[in-house]
Image (cartoon, rainbow, N blue to C red):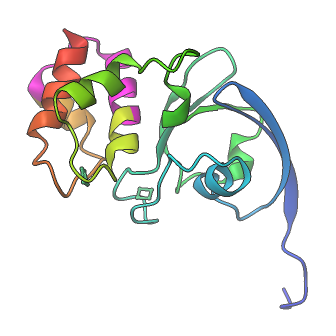
Amino acid sequence: MSPNTPAPSARVTVNVDGTRYVDTVEARTLLVQYLRDNVGKTGTVVGCDTSNCGACTVLMGTADEIGHSVKSCSVLAVQADGQSVTTVEGLAGPDGSLHAVQRAFHEMHGLQCGFCTPGMIMATVDLLQDNPDPSDEEIRDGLSGNLCRCTGYQNIVRAATCTAR
Ligand code: FES
Ligand code: FES
C-alpha cells in the first residue's frame, strides 16, 4: 500500500456502557483506542499495549449479557461491531452509586497509584460472575492476567474476597 493510500476503514455500531455509538474507524484501530479517542471513555487505560498488563480490560458480550473480560488492546474496534462493551465507567449505578466491586476496592484499599485499578475491577467483576465464591488461590489465578506494580496484590485479593462473601 502506498503511503498516500487511505487506510481501510469500516463502520461500526457498538453499545458502550448502555449508549449506542455508530462510527467509522480505521480497520487497524484497537478497541482501547476507540473507547478512549472516539467514545471518551478514558477510564480504560493503556499500560503496555502488548497484552501483558490488563490495565485495558473491559467486558464485551452480546446485547443481552454483561459479557466477559477482554484486553481491549488486543481487540480491534471492528471486532466489537454489534457487541456491548462495559467499561469501568459503566459499572456505577444510574445514581452514581459504586458497583460492589468498586466499593470493595475502595474499602479494602485495593489500590495505590490506581493505574491498574480499572482493569483489575473489570477482571474481578468477570471472575465473580463465573465463580461467586472463589478461594484466594482462585482469585489470584483469575486475576493473573492483570499486573499491579504497587499493592503486592494482598488488598486486591481481600477486595475480591469481601465482594464475594
Ligand atoms: Fe496492557 Fe492492554 S494495555 S494488556
Ligand atoms: Fe499502582 Fe496497581 S495500584 S499499578
Q: Residue at x 56, y 29 (%)?
A: 90
Q: Is residue 98 left or right of residue 63?
A: left
Q: Nearer the viewer, residue 21 or 63?
A: 21
Direction from residue 48 to residue 112 in the image, left or right: left
Measured as percent of width and height from the top left, residue 26 is found at 79, 63
The magenta region covers 122-136
Indicate left or right for 71 with 117 as reference. Answer: right
Q: Main secondary structure of the magenta part?
A: helix
User: What residue sits 46% from the left and 50% below the top?
Assistant: 56
Where does the image place residue 36, in percent across and percent down from the top left? 62, 53
- Give the quarter of the image for residue 127: top left
Q: Position of residue 12 (x, y in %)?
A: 82, 45
Quarter containing ligand 1? bottom left
Identified at 64% across, 49% down, the residue is 35
The quadrant holding residue 154 is: top left
Q: Quadrant of the N terminus?
A: bottom right
